Image (spheres, rainbow, N blue to C red):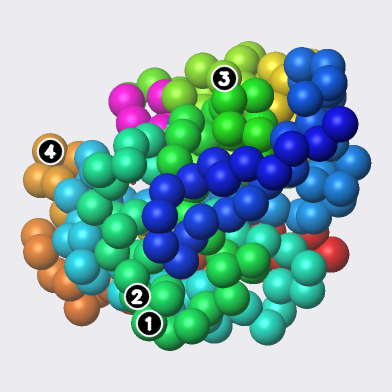
Amino acid sequence: KTQETVSSSSGMATQKIKVHEDMAPGSISQDESDIPTLAFPSISTADFQFDLEKASDVIVGKVEEFMDKLGNARLVLVDLTERSKILSLVRAKAAEKKIDSKRFFTFIGDICQLYTKGGLCCNVIANAANWRLKPGGGGVNAAIFNAGGPALEAATKEQARSLLPGNALVVRLPSTSPLYSKEGVTHVIHVLGPNMNPRRPNCLDNDYVKGCKVLEDAYSSLFKGFLSIAN
Ligand code: AR6
């Protein structure tokens, strides 16, 4: 038995999702899970204090650039609340550019519980990481390492001990990770964005020429990393 529900907020981003009422918790609906989907947070715009207007331009520009490389894959920008300013800005700018809302949309929820709480199947999620690729530190990084458990930490460490701003690291999740078994996430992509917070390492001191370039590089690395595992 299936039911059509509208699971995200208004505007261009409204996405219909099939929710199977009789689905066992943790099982993935066949049709939805077939579509490679990357869920990503807005990199650098909370703890790293990057300007939201500029970040939204970068996000929409990069999404537009990757649109024709996506095939049947989807990109989903996620934030925690419906009051999210970055989601509103991106929705408005994506609608203006007439970006296909089946291939790119926004979604409200915890990126670690998109399937179990939101009914949205995302096989890949991105993390707004720190340069040491360390758990904790708040924000989405703390949430993802927490939900991924020791398996995510170990798999990350096996690949790299640090990350340069503008770069992304694709990590395959071991099946022992709860993010894999409960949420159906097969990969986490760690991304290090530009930092404008003087209390964090590598602060760019409001140099937005450099900052926008680094943020563009970060999204390019993220989307390329996703496409390398989606296709
Ligand atoms: N689900 C979805 N989105 C979230 C979640 C979540 N669970 N938690 C936060 N966001 P931030 P940054 C949104 O601060 O600015 C860390 O401590 C949030 O509302 O996590 O790149 C790292 O260790 C915002 O829109 O990342 C780094 O040191 C977005 O995710 C530093 O912060 C990014 O917010 C990185 O700072």
Answer above or below: position of 175 versus 108: above
Q: Secondary structure at mark 2?
A: helix
Mark 2: few, some, or many residues within 10 Å (few <14, many ≥20)? Answer: some
Q: Is residue 28 visible?
A: no
Mark 4 lies on residue:
199
Instruction: From the top left corner, tell me how far across and down residue 117 is, in percent.
Output: 58, 25
Mark 3 or mark 2, whichever is nearer to me:
2
> Which is more N-terminal, label 3 or label 1?
1
Instruction: From the top left corner, tell me how far across and down residue 134 is, in percent.
Output: 45, 28
Mark 2 lies on residue:
93
Identity, as a three-letter code, of the amino acid under mark 2: Lys
Mark 3 lies on residue:
147
> Which is more N-terminal, label 4 or label 1?
1
Say whether residue 193 is left or right of residue 178: left
Is residue 147 magenta-colored? Answer: no
- Find the distance from the CA under tag 1 to the CA under tag 3: 36 Å
Mark 1 or mark 3, whichever is nearer to me:
1
| Segment tinted magenta in the rendering | 138-142
Answer above or below: position of 90 versus 191: below
Mark 2 and 1 residues: CB-CB less than 8 Å, in contact?
A: yes
> Which is more N-terminal, label 2 or label 4?
2
Say whether residue 204 is left or right of residue 100: left
Which circle marks residue 96 in the picture? Answer: 1
- Find the distance from the CA under tag 3 to the CA under tag 2: 32 Å
Kindly indicate the quadrant of the structure image that contains residue 54. Answer: bottom left
Q: Quadrant of ligand 1?
A: top left
